[in-house]
Every structure is written in structure tokens, then in C-alpha cells.
Image (cartoon, rainbow, N blue to C red):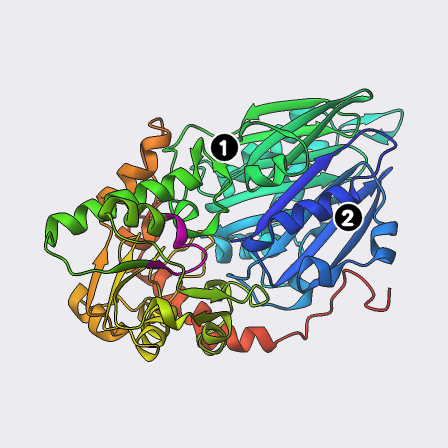
Amino acid sequence: MCGIIGIVGRLGHHVNQLLYDGLTVLQHRGQDAAGILTDAGGNFRLRKSNGLVSDVFFKRHMMRLEGNVGIGHVRYPTAGSSSRAEAQPFYVNSPYGIALAHNGNLTNADELSVMLRDEYMRHINTSSDSELLLNILAVELGQRSRALKIEGDPHMNIETVFGAVSAVHEHVRGGYACVSVVAGYGLLAFRDPNGIRPLIYGQRETDEGTEYIVGSESVAITALGFEVVRDVAPGEAIFISSSGHLFTRQCAEPSVYSPCIFEHVYFARPDSVIDGISVYQARRNQGQRLAERLLESWPDHDIDVVIPIPDSGRIAALQMAKSLDLPYREGFVKNRYVGRTFIMPGQALREKSVRRKLNAIEHEFLGKNVLLVDDSIVRGTTSAQIIEMARDVGASKVYFASAAPPVRHPNVYGIDMPAVKEFIADGKSIEEISNTIGSDKLFYQSLEDLVDVTRMENPKITAFDASCFDGQYVTGDIDVTYLERLDKARNDGAKGMNHMDDDVIAMHNDEEN
């Protein structure tokens, strides 16, 4: 799960600061690396490295990132490693010069790698599937551009662009939302045919013309002073020329619109609207329905207080407290300088970080039966340690509620849930999970309820990618062999080794600059 942004500003105005500010708004989507690329009259300017946005970009870098067209990326590593060389955007020099940033995962990456090597003799320098996607786009754009010249110079028209994207959709499978820059021509953005990964575009009017923006979440658009136009449709491509002309085209056959439901459970900011659904309202609805089910199964409960796991459990917990007619209390103080533990690479790092991230307020627990509410339980790391913390400060009983169902299947479309054996719910009943995390009683949202309350905000969404809950993969290409291979490549042990591997030459920039 990464964050992407692309901006086409007015001619003669630089978009570097807007891109930087947009990436800070999207920082929650990836804390491993950050990158910005701009196009200054056909010349690319690039800065990318490991670290938070504020750690990667300094004044000297920003001054060099000139141009009215640019893209940005914050990385949360799933496929590939955490090497500096795999920070995005990626770049190829032919045709034209193309750079691309990508959110998601490709499920046929191995097949694409062989095709690029054997059929097109393209060199892939990293293990990132984003680099594969860029090279597929380059191949298809190049094949359609060879005969296009004006006064002897290479030329690209809009049919060339959209034809290339259509071909990309034919080759590529998985979840992907992309922003790309073609040197001297403009910004290209496109989304997978199922709409698994989010992509939204907006605009703002100025005295000198219209400026355009594309991003992973609506908050990145509105926070920069743009107005949201709409979500990019599944399979749709948007091209905005450097001079500010916008073109759209449906580049893939209609498929089942299946946005990722985990965006509304955990990943997205609550002040975002994605696929016409308010994330905040969706999480309120999740808390409401969970409270109703708790009362149905346990009408004579002895809960004294509802306490959220900050920050992602807060909205559901507040609604649960209201519906249960119970006090809502903040029982944990969060250290803002510790990142989101869910997206940290490796179990050992996550375990060390939980207690550094949260500290209990003893008064709110002492002698009470508390209901702790979280957005989800994946590995159980956070849940078990938080329950232990609650008992350490005097809680009489600790009940636990998850606003999402048990995670029992790998997510293959860009969320770091590759290895089944790392899920606490693997092969366990709800009672067994409760015993493992140490709760006195455990409540899960059902998948049927989660889907129902999330789509309340947009009934036009008839399906979600909920594969981590039900094992139903919307791309139709996932089998046991694939999942076993995924497990071996991306479990915590393998990820730890990859994280240490930084031997690939980082071609992107000189660290001294």
C-alpha cells in the first residue's frame, strides 16, 4: 500500500512544493521511502530515498525540482525489498523518457519479467513490480510511436497514449493505480480494471488556467486547495498535457468494480472520500453494527467503559459507546513519533514498537471491565500487548472488539498480508483467538455486516475486494501454488533478509547532492 500523487500546474509555475505537501498528507500510506520527479521542459528532475518525506527532501533538493508537471510517491514495501534503489518513481529513457509511480501489486509479475527479458530485451534493475509495470508501458508506447513524427521529431498523440494503456491492461493483472510523466508531453494516470486500488482526480481554476491533480485519497486533493472532480473509473486512463488539456478514456473492458474494503477499515485517512464512500462514516457504521450484534449476543453484558486503540479504532469505538449507552474514555496515549506498526517490515520490529507507541492511563482501567475496540486483528501483535497493558494497570476484565472480520487469507493486491501462518486467526476459532491474545471475550464484525455498512454510503458499489477475509480473489488468477510462492518470498523472515539487501546500485541520485 503506497501513496501516489501527480500534478499539472500552470506553465511557468513549479509544482515541487505542492507535491511535497501532498506526500506529507499521504505519509500514513507509506513510511519506508519517498520520491518526487518533475518535468522541466522535457528534462526530468528526481529525488528519492528511504525515509519519511521530511527526511528525504531538503531545501537544496526542492530548489532543483523545477517544472510544472510532476509526480510523487511514498512507499510501503510489499513485493520487492526495502532497498533505496526501489524507492519510486522509476524512470526509463525510451520512448520519450517516462517515469512512473505505482500503488499496488501485480499478481503476474514473474510472467511479465520473463516476457520483458525474452521478448523485448528490457533490463529490469530491481525486484519491484512497479519497474515491471513501467517497462510494459514503455514497450507498448514505443511500439505505437515509431511512425509518429512531425518535421522529423518524435511525436505522440492521445490515441497513442490510450492505446498503450489498453495494451497494459491486457498484459497486467493485479491491483494497480499509477501516475506517470512522459517527458515534454504531460501526465498519465490509470487504474486497474477492477478498481482495487484507489485513484481520484481534482482541479482548481486560476486566472492563468486550470490546474489538475491526481492522488490516492481525496484528502491529498482538498488539502492542497483543489476540488475533487471524481474517482478515476476502473480501467480508465487520464492524460493531462503539459499545457493543461485533459483527456479521458475507458481503456479496459468493464469488470466487476471491486474497491479494496481494507481502505475503509484501516488504511485511508478518515477525512478521505474514496469511491464515493466517506471513510469516516463507514467506520462509524462499522461501530454501530458491531454494537448491535454485541447486544444481540450478550444483552446482559457487564462492560463498564469503551476504550479505543488509537488511532484507527477511535471512530468505531465512539459509535459503539454511544450505541451501548456506555462511557467512552481515552485509555491510551499515542506517541506520534512512532510509525504505524502494521506497516512495519517484520514481526520483531512491530513487537518492539507497540509499547513504545502506546502508554496506558491507569485511572481509566483500574477496577473496571473494559471493552477495547480496534479496527482489525491481523497478526495479533498489537492486540495481545495492549490487553496485557490493560491488565497491568488494573483492569478487572478485558473484552476486545474488532470492527473487521478475522483475517484468514493473504492479500495479494498491495497490502502486507502475504503469509497465512503469520495471521493469528489461521486455523483458530474465535474462542481460540481470544485465548491467544488474552481477552476475556472477543467480538468480530461479520463480513456480511462489514460489506453492508460500508456500501451504505454508495449503493452503486456492489462488490468489494475482501480477499483477506473470504479468500475470493477478484482477478481470478490466484491458486494454491501462487500463494505458497508468495508466502516463501514475502513472509517476515524473507522480508527481513530483503530489508538488509541494499546491494543494487541506487541509480536515482547521488547521496551527496
Left or right of 248, for residue 434:
left
Amino acid bearing label 2: Asn
Q: Nearer the viewer, residue 125 or 11?
A: 11
> How far apart are the two marked residues, 1 and 2, measured between alpha carbons?
26 Å
Residue 29 higher or lower than 200, as above or below: below
Of tags 1 and 2, the one toward the viewer is 1
* Residue 462 falls within the magenta-colored stretch: no
**x and y, in percent, of residue 34 in the image:** 67, 57
Residue at image coords 58%, 34%: 165
Q: Which residue carries the number 2 mark?
A: 93
Q: Which residue is mark 1?
A: 235
Decide: few, some or many residues near mark 1? Use Cα within 10 Å; few <14, some 14-19, many ≥20: many
* Residue 138's disc number: none
Question: Which residue is drawn at the image coordinates 45% and 33% (left, top)?
Answer: 275
Label located before the other in sequence (1 or 2): 2
x%, y% of residue 451? 29, 40
Part of the protein shown in magenta: 307-315
Nearest the camera: 229 or 476? Answer: 229
Residue lying at 32% horizontally and 45% vertically, measured from the top left: 319
Question: Residue 314 magenta-drawn?
Answer: yes
Identity, as a three-letter code, of the amino acid under mark 1: Gly
Residue 395 visible somewhere in the drawing: yes
Task: Say what secondary structure mark 1 lies in.
Answer: loop
